[in-house]
Amino acid sequence: MEDLKQGSARKGEERPGAFAAFPYDRMTVERFREAFPRARWDEDRRSWFVPGKAARRRVERWLAREAELQDVHGDAKGRDAYAFDPIASPYLEVGDDLRVRTPYSRTVLEQMRAIPWARWDEELGIWRVPFRSYEELRRRWQTIERAARRSEPEARKRHRQEKKGSEEEKVERLRAAERRRRRYPLAAEDLPPLDRPVATHQYGIVVFTEISGEIVEPCSMSDIYPHTREAQSDFVWGTWRTPTLAELVATWPARHEAALHDHFRGWWQPTLAELRTARRNARSLERRRQMRERHRSF
């Protein structure tokens, strides 16, 4: 189910109510219309608007019941799929749910965060995946396992020795230094809005806080920022920060994938898939921060 939003039916109106969006399914829509006969589809927001002062509470309860119904059915279906075509791997344990334990890998992290309902168990140091997400886990497993094997201590050591002094090592060091500087090249003729989440090539969804006006030298940065290679205009440096969960939730997704010119300028309005991933990451970071604070208070 998607995020529930409080609002009015049309821009400029003060009509109380709540917006709700969920993946399309004919039976789900029929149940929704039966529960909320006054609901109307809002084409601009691609969401249902339910009028009424108590709309948010009513819709939240309905979404919770729907989620329970889908969870039970999805878990049963996932268990059947696992029994028919199991994943055999030292990185996967099976119990009441699916448990993924690997060495640290950025690729594994990205893949796991993209799996619906997967969550990080800080206490056990594992990823927990409900059976309802088994098909998505299987689809990504080859990438996960390959990255996990590359991240084993011996494999890391061997790889470090092989690339020592190479051009690859130099680029990696430059890339790490650039990330610490929190700067990003932007097409000077088409700058992003400040203080609003936008998607980028290297750093995912970020919020730009300042445009310095300093011209980027494309030749020196093309290995780190490939979108500057075919530049037809000047690029300037923009300073960025990580968006908060509240900012990500409030960001409305693009209707379509980014066009070619959006990629050339270096930023674009994030799609729903990109926002989902960023929101899960932000929630995970928030949970970890809260757990650290609780541990410090003991």
Image (cartoon, grey):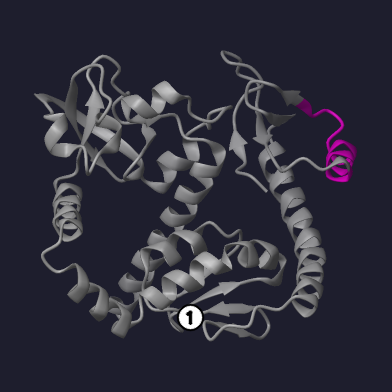
Q: Which residue is mark 1?
A: 101
**Observer-nearest residue: 178 or 96?**
178
Q: Is residue 77 left or right of 223 when viewed as pictured?
A: right
Q: Residue at x 26, y 14 (%)?
A: 189
Q: Where in the figure is residue 74, as x and y percent of width and height?
A: 77, 64
Percent across and percent down for residue 86 are 71, 78
Residue 243 against residue 90 in the figure, above or below: above
Picture quadrant of residue 85? bottom right
- Vertical arrangement, residue 66 with respect to residue 257, above or below: below
Q: Main secondary structure of the magenta part?
A: helix
Residue 24: quadrant of the picture: top right
Is residue 189 left or right of 113 when viewed as pictured? left
Q: Look at the image and tell me whether residue 120 can be seen.
A: no
* Number of numbered discs visible in the structure rendering: 1
Q: Quarter holding the C terminus?
A: bottom left
Q: Is residue 40 something one can see in this rendering?
A: yes
**Element at badge 1?**
loop
Range covered by the magenta-colored residues:
27-40
Let me know if residue 52 is in the magenta part.
no
